[in-house]
């Protein structure tokens, strides 16, 4: 069973702080990794994608991938109350299984 | 570019009935995936279609089925509804061949309530 694990939270940070969200995956041949944000009552929206080891930055968001440790993380700098949402880690396996496996998500609350 | 469109947004059905949900992908996207989302299980993969062919299927009973049409629009059907089928059903499309590097773009979902 290929799994994606996330801390369920809730993770609470003050406004302006750095929020760190973590994810581990079990399938060693996984090739593509995504972070989605889901507001309550809404559908998931793509924030970041990362495919190779290292860091990838996009505005206030940085995704980090370590394939040897089977670990992917998302850092949110200068957190805003509008960042309060559930963050979903998704992993696409190797080969041609054509599906994303999602973690159950981490609920982030940014306090003003 | 219009996003993924799912209809209807809300459905209320009774046990034993069947239901059909519809999804129109982003223009040009040929891969369509379906997910079930519940508070306890999170997002669970149902199936994926590309050019009218099912390429992958999740661990759901045969009551859950789907299809894709030549214009890439997709439908999923759930027969003999059970209370546990109450969930948010999400459709997502992706570009290219829908392969490993293609992210999913989700629709707004269909909220199904089974009473």
Image (tube, rainbow, N blue to C red):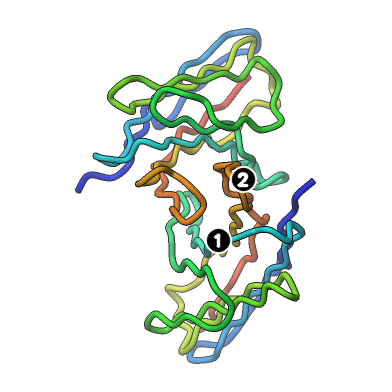
Identity of the residue drawn at 50% across and 58% down: A38
The residue positioned 62% from the left and 81% from the top of the image is A20
Residue B41 falls left or right of residue B106: right
Looking at this view, name the residue that lies furthest to the right.
A1
State the residue position of label 2.
Answer: B43
Residues B103 and B7: in front is: B103
**Quarter of the rendering occupied by the C terminus of chain B:** top right
Mark seen at residue A10 = none
Check the residue under mark 2 and report the chain it is in: B
Dividing the picture into quadrants, the one containing residue B70 is: top left
Q: Is residue A86 above or below residue A101?
A: below
The kind of secondary structure element at disc 1 is strand
Label 2 crowd bin: few (<14), some (14–19), many (20+), radius 10 Å: many
- In the rendering, at what x and y percent does residue A71 appear? 70, 72
In the image, is residue A60 above or below residue B102? below
Which marked residue is nearer to the observer: mark 1 or mark 2? Answer: 1
Q: Relative to residue B41, is residue A96 drawn left or right?
A: left
How many C-alpha atoms fall within 10 Å of the one at disc 1: few (<14), some, or many (≥20)? many
| Mark 1–mark 2 CB contact (< 8 Å) | no
Q: Name the residue under label 1.
A: A32
Image quadrant of residue A17? bottom right
Q: Residue furthest front?
A: A95
The residue positioned 48% from the left and 49% from the top of the image is A41
State whether discs 1 and 2 lie on one chain. no
Residue at far left of view: B1
* Distance in Å between CA atoms under marks 1 and 2: 17 Å
Across and down, in percent, residue B86 comes to 62, 29
Give residue B78's position: percent from left, percent from top: 57, 17
Q: Is mark 2 on a helix, strand or loop?
A: strand
Q: Which chain does tag 1 point to?
A: A
């Amino acid at each position: 069973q290929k799994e994606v694990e996330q801390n369920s939270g809730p993770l609470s940070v003050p406004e302006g702080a750095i929020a760190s969200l973590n994810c581990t995956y079990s399938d060693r041949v996984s090739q593509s990794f995504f972070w989605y944000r889901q507001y309550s009552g809404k559908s998931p929206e793509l924030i970041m994608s990362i495919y190779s080891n290292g860091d990838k930055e996009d505005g206030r968001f940085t995704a980090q991938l370590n394939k040897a440790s089977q670990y992917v993380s998302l850092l949110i700098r200068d957190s805003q109350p509008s960042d309060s949402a559930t963050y979903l880690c998704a992993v696409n396996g190797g080969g041609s299984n054509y599906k994303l496996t999602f973690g159950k998500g981490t609920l982030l609350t940014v306090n003003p | 570019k219009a996003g993924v469109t799912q209809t209807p947004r809300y459905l209320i059905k009774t046990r034993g009935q069947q239901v059909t949900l519809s999804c129109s992908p982003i223009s040009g996207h040929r891969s369509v995936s379906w997910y079930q989302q519940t508070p306890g299980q999170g997002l669970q993969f149902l199936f994926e279609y590309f050019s009218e062919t099912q390429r992958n299927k999740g661990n759901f009973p045969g009551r859950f089925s789907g299809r894709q049409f030549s214009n890439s629009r997709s439908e999923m059907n759930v027969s003999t509804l059970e209370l546990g089928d109450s969930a948010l059903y999400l459709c997502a499309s992706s570009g290219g061949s829908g392969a490993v590097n293609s992210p999913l773009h989700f629709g707004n979902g269909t909220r199904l309530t089974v009473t």
